[in-house]
Amino acid sequence: MNLKKEFIIRSIKILDIGYITAIYIILGIVLATICDRNLGKFDEKTENNKPLYQSIIELILYLWFIGIVVYIVRNLNLGYIFYW
């Protein structure tokens, strides 16, 4: 592969990395705002009074939700648009 083609491919990969990073940041901010509105403000006293099993279940559900969002964002990768 010649140097010019290698440079073009590497440039496309760098653009793709930046594109995906921007999507993650924007989606993260949007989802954090939505969660904050729906779940309300964090109250330390209420959280301390919850049983441990409830906190563990909530943590698992949050991680599950994050995993689904990451999966969706990875599949939204439109980096193929840059490839000819």
Image (tube, rainbow, N blue to C red):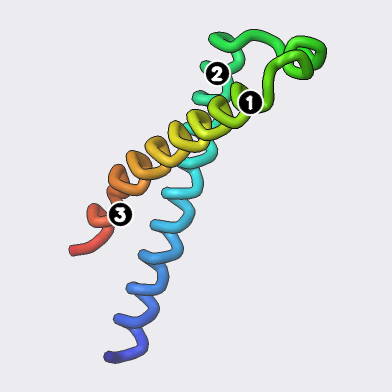
Confirm or deny contact between disc 1 and disc 2 (CB under 8 A): no
Residue 54 on image: x %, y %: 60, 22
In space, the residues marked 1 and 2 are separated at their CA atoms by 16 Å
The residue beneath circle 2 is 35
- The kind of secondary structure element at disc 3 is helix
Q: Earlier in the sequence, mark 1 or mark 2?
A: 2
Q: In the image shown, does 18 or 25 lie closer to the viewer?
A: 25
- Amino acid found under the numbered disc labelled 2: Cys
Q: Is residue 59 above or below residue 21?
A: above
Q: Is residue 5 left or right of residue 70?
A: left
Q: How many marks?
A: 3
Say whether residue 29 is visible.
no
Front disc: 1 or 2: 1
Q: Quadrant where the C terminus lies?
A: bottom left
Q: Disc number at residue 17? A: none
The CA span between labels 3 and 2 is 29 Å
Q: CA gap, disc 1 to disc 3?
A: 38 Å
Residue sticking out furthest to the bottom: 2
Q: Is residue 9 left or right of residue 50?
A: left
Asked where in the image residue 39 lies, by quadrant, the reply is top right
The image position of residue 17, as x and y in percent, is 45, 57
Name the disc covering residue 55, or none.
Answer: 1
Circle 3 crowding by C-alpha within 10 Å: few under 14, some 14–19, many from 20: some
Residue under label 3:
79
Q: Is residue 53 above or below residue 80?
A: above
Q: Earlier in the sequence, mark 1 or mark 3?
A: 1
Q: Quadrant of residue 58?
A: top right
Which amino acid, mark 3? Gly
Q: Are marks 3 and 2 in contact (CB under 8 Å)?
A: no
Residue at 55 percent across and 18 percent down: it is: 35
Q: Amino acid at mark 1?
A: Ser
Task: Identify the image quadrant of residue 55.
Answer: top right
